[in-house]
Amino acid sequence: MHCASCVATIERVLSKAAGVHSASVNFASESALIEFDENVISESGLEKAV
């Protein structure tokens, strides 16, 4: 991630993905906390979405 705009974009894309309940991205640690239904989307599916 390069800026706060990247954080907003990633959160928006993840939130729109099927099976994602919530997504919170942290710019400082370059990490994301994502609550999702494993029966609908996999971790690799989340990576592809981003």
Image (cartoon, rainbow, N blue to C red):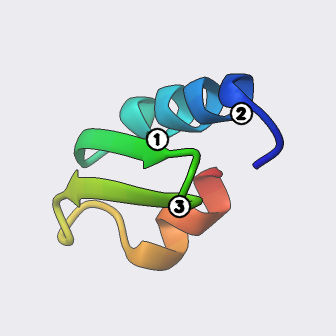
Gap in Å between the C-alphas at discs 3 and 2? 13 Å
Q: Please tell me whether mark 1 sits on a helix, a strand or a loop.
A: helix
- Callout 2 amino acid: Cys
Q: Residue at x 77, y 33 (%)?
A: 3
Q: Residue at x 57, y 51 (%)?
A: 28
Nearest to N terminus: mark 3 or mark 2: 2
Q: Nearer the viewer, residue 16 or 40?
A: 16
Disc 2 + disc 1, Cβ < 8 Å:
no
Horizontal relation, residue 10 to residue 45: left or right: right
Gap in Å between the C-alphas at discs 2 and 1? 12 Å
Residue 29 bears which disc, if any? 3
Nearest to N terminus: mark 1 or mark 3: 1
Q: Position of residue 34 (x, y in %)?
A: 29, 55
Neighbours of disc 1 within 10 Å: few (<14), some (14-19), many (20+) = many
- Callout 3 amino acid: Ser
Q: Residue at x 83, y 43 (%)?
A: 2
Q: Position of residue 43 (x, y in %)?
A: 42, 75
Q: Is residue 41 above or below residue 44?
A: above
Disc 1 + disc 3, Cβ < 8 Å:
no
Horizontal relation, residue 29 to residue 16: left or right: right
Q: Position of residue 10 (x, y in %)?
A: 59, 38
Q: Label 1: which residue?
A: 14
Q: Label 2: which residue?
A: 6
- Callout 1 amino acid: Leu
Q: Residue at x 46, y 41 (%)?
A: 14
Q: Nearer the viewer, residue 11 or 40?
A: 11
Horizontal relation, residue 37 to residue 44: left or right: left
